[in-house]
């Protein structure tokens, strides 16, 4: 899947939209998060080519154009309008009360049995001429996300320089809110990553990224979503109406860590700062949120057996 990106704005709002995106990025937001503004610009260029003021007619028509993605569309145009007003320009702010409410419920926690079936599916991923590393990437990237509680964009943003295989750590660089952190990783998982790196090096010897796409460039977020959905469908997990997302690995990591501490008799209150730092939370309250997700059905965490997933590599041949 192609990475969502901005190809350049062309409507009367082009310059203002560009400035808005730069402003949000400077605050730590990801450019892709405002991808809907691509369509807004195209809409204005087609329907309102001479418009330079964000009026109520433009906003309401844009928000009502489709039910698909309406929450994000309304929210993004509200933020753009607020930005314009802060710059002293007139703009209509779509009312928050008119935006449909999300019905997300509680985050999806992947059970131990679902994890087993999911990783069994990734381990059986077949090779593809279009993406020769897919069969090796799926078993590793999702175990890394679950084993370390990584955000999806942290996983695809990893470079080879971020891995310290000798000391068993990974450096997470320029993550949410431009924060960096170094995390310790289990030796089983580090070894799995090392073996993947050796194999990927055979395909792309000069690559800088850790998880490359078919061209040797960093794996994109949409491609990671596709790979996850493909793996989940192959797993045969029946989730009824609910369905996990990439962030479910992060939710599961947090709840399983907390549950393990409870079973070990540790003081959760004193342990929260450690989990907060490991997960890259800015505020402790973001970590406390996971406490309410602790379900009785979560079993004691057992890390997945990675033997045989990727062929053993003779270190002397590479180092």
Image (cartoon, rainbow, N blue to C red):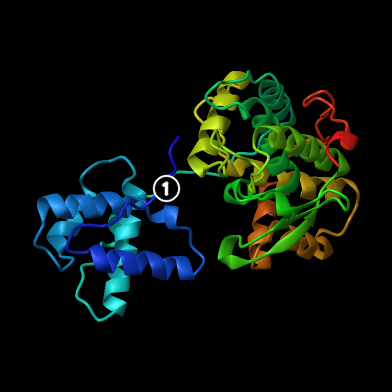
Percent position of residue 296, x then y? 74, 39
Asked which secondary structure carries label 1, the reply is loop
Q: Tell me: 145 left or right of 93.
A: right
Q: Tell me: 113 left or right of 282.
A: right
Q: Which residue is mark 1?
A: 102
Does 57 appear above or below 113?
Answer: below
**Which quarter of the rendered picture does the N terminus lie within?**
top left
Q: Residue at x 43, y 38 (%)?
A: 2
**Which quarter of the rendered picture does the C terminus lie within?**
top right
Q: Tell me: 25 left or right of 212.
A: left
Give the camera-side residue of 55 and 25. Answer: 25
Q: Residues within 10 Å of mark 1 (few under 14, many from 20)?
A: few
Does 202 appear above or below 149?
Answer: above
Give the camera-side residue of 167 and 275. Answer: 167
Q: Tell me: 116 left or right of 69.
A: right
Give the camera-side residue of 281 and 31. Answer: 31
């Amino acid at each position: 899947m192609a990475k969502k990106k901005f190809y350049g704005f062309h409507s009367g709002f082009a310059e203002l939209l560009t400035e808005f995106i730069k402003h949000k990025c400077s605050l730590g937001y990801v450019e892709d998060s405002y991808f809907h503004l691509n369509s807004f610009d195209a809409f204005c260029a087609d329907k309102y080519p001479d418009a330079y003021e964000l009026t109520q007619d433009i906003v309401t028509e844009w928000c009502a154009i489709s039910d698909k993605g309406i929450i994000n569309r309304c929210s993004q145009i509200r933020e753009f309008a607020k930005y314009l007003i802060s710059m002293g320009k007139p703009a209509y702010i779509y009312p928050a009360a008119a935006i449909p409410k999300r019905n997300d419920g509680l985050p999806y926690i992947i059970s131990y049995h679902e994890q087993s079936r999911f990783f069994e599916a990734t381990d059986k991923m077949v090779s593809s001429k279009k993406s020769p590393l897919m069969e090796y990437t799926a078993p590793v990237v999702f175990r890394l996300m679950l084993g370390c509680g990584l955000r999806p964009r942290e996983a695809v943003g990893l470079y080879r320089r971020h891995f310290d295989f000798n000391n068993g750590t990974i450096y997470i660089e320029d993550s949410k809110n431009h924060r960096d952190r170094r995390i310790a990783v289990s030796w089983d998982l580090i070894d799995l990553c090392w073996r993947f790196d050796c194999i990927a090096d055979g395909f792309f010897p000069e690559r800088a990224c850790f998880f490359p796409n078919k061209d040797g460039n960093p794996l994109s977020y949409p491609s990671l979503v596709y790979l996850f959905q493909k793996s989940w469908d192959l797993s045969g997990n029946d989730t009824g109406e609910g369905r996990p997302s990439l962030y479910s690995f992060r939710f599961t990591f947090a709840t399983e860590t907390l549950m393990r501490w409870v079973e070990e008799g540790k003081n959760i209150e004193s342990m929260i700062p450690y989990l907060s730092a490991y997960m890259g939370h800015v505020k402790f309250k973001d970590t406390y949120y996971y406490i309410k997700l602790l379900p009785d059905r979560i079993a004691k965490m057992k890390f997945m057996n990675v033997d045989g997933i990727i062929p053993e590599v003779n270190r002397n041949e590479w180092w």
